[in-house]
Image (cartoon, rainbow, N blue to C red):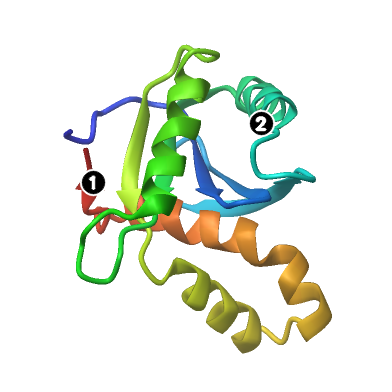
Amino acid sequence: MEKEDIKGRLLGLDFGSKTVGVSVSDPLQLTAKSLCTVRRERENKLRQTLAEIVRIAQEEEVVKIVVGLPLNMDGTEGERCEKTREFVSLLEKRIDVPVVFCDERLTTEEAYEIMEEYGVPKEKQLEMVDSVAAMHILQDYLNGKDKICG
């Protein structure tokens, strides 16, 4: 899937087993910023998570959603990719903006590196890692380093 020239904010998502990191771009699609982390008690309890993401997307007036696809290091897809694709399928039924996948390998590690570099206390890093990873996914996409996945 090719990147489209759609003007407006993009939403970046880092889907995890109990959290979804959320980031948003500026309207010119130059920079991404960490927004929040949506948490749930159990992995399969997605209704409220999906509703919250739809609410955020509408509030931020996003024109596209970029979701990190957690490929294995060799580029193959595993169980987490399957769960991410299922999540996106449910999201697409609830929102009328395009959703694309983007390679997210090593974004969590890079998020920790960024927070360490900026002196974020260890206890705060765990709280922020998902939204910072989502920011990294979205910024990679904006920079054209996205390795868009199908």
Q: State the quadrant of the N terminus.
A: top left
Kindly tell me whether residue 30 is visible in this rendering: no
Element at label 1: strand
Closer to the camera in the image, 32 or 102: 102
- Give coordinates of residue 86: x percent, y percent: 44, 32
* Residue named by callout 1: 148
- Give coordinates of residue 113: x percent, y percent: 54, 83
* Residue at point 77%, 65% (across, down): 127
Element at label 2: loop
Q: Which mark is residue 130?
A: none
* Residue named by callout 2: 46
Q: Is residue 80 left or right of residue 147?
A: right
Circle 1 residues within 10 Å: few <14, some 14–19, many ≥20:
some
* Residue at point 74%, 81% (across, down): 120
Q: Is residue 3 left or right of residue 143?
A: left
Quarter-of-image position of residue 107: bottom left
Separation of residues labelled 1 and 2 (CA atoms): 25 Å
* Residue at point 48%, 13% (across, down): 93
Circle 2 residues within 10 Å: few <14, some 14–19, many ≥20:
some
Number of numbered discs present?
2
- Whichever of callouts 1 and 2 sits on the residue coming sooner in the sequence is 2
Looking at the image, residue 92 lies above or below residue 104: above
Q: Amino acid at mark 1?
A: Ile
Closer to the camera in the image, 85 or 68: 85
Q: State the quadrant of the C terminus.
A: top left
Q: Amino acid at mark 2?
A: Leu
